[in-house]
Image: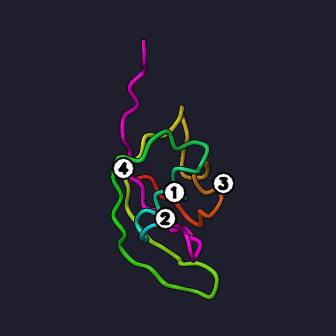
Amino acid sequence: MAVELSATTVAVRLWVPRGAAGDLPGGARDVLEGVRVVERVESLAVEDFRPTATDIRVELRAEVALAGDADASDLENGFGVVEATLE
């Protein structure tokens, strides 16, 4: 029997590498999906961004399914994630 994970709203600031394939939301989704505790990204909305020399800082809100009892600090341990808040 499969366990259905419920979605959680998160506010996240992360870094998207310049030159990443696709558009900015797609690059942000790739970074978020690469975090070990993220099982699934259901939706994502970019709220702000700031380009730098090597990457783009992105602030977004997303609906994600997290593994187990993961919290914001577990998200922040993911590569490219600067700050995360569960809402």
Q: Return the residue at label 3.
A: 77
Q: Return the residue at label 2.
A: 27
Residue 10 among those drawn in magenta: yes
Query: In the orientation shown, which residue stands out farthest toward the bottom?
Result: 53
Q: Are marks 2 and 3 in contact (CB under 8 Å)?
A: no
Residue 16 among those drawn in magenta: yes
- In the depicted view, which residue is nearer to us: 21 or 42? 21
Amino acid at the residue labelled 2? Gly
Sequence-first tag of 2 and 3: 2
SS assignment at label 3: loop
Q: Return the residue at label 4.
A: 63
Q: Position of residue 53 (x, y in %)?
A: 62, 88
The residue lying at 56 percent from left, 75 percent from top is 19
SS assignment at label 4: strand
Amino acid at the residue labelled 3? Asn
Q: Position of residue 4 (x, y in %)?
A: 38, 25
Q: Return the residue at label 1.
A: 30
SS assignment at label 2: helix
Sequence-first tag of 3 and 4: 4
Sequence-first tag of 4 and 2: 2
Amino acid at the residue labelled 4? Glu
Horizontally, residue 82 falls left or right of residue 26, namely: right
Q: Position of residue 41 (x, y in %)?
A: 41, 47
Q: Which residues are magenta?
A: 1-21
Count residues near mark 3 (Cα–Cα under 10 Å), then give few for <14, some for 14-19, many for 20+: some
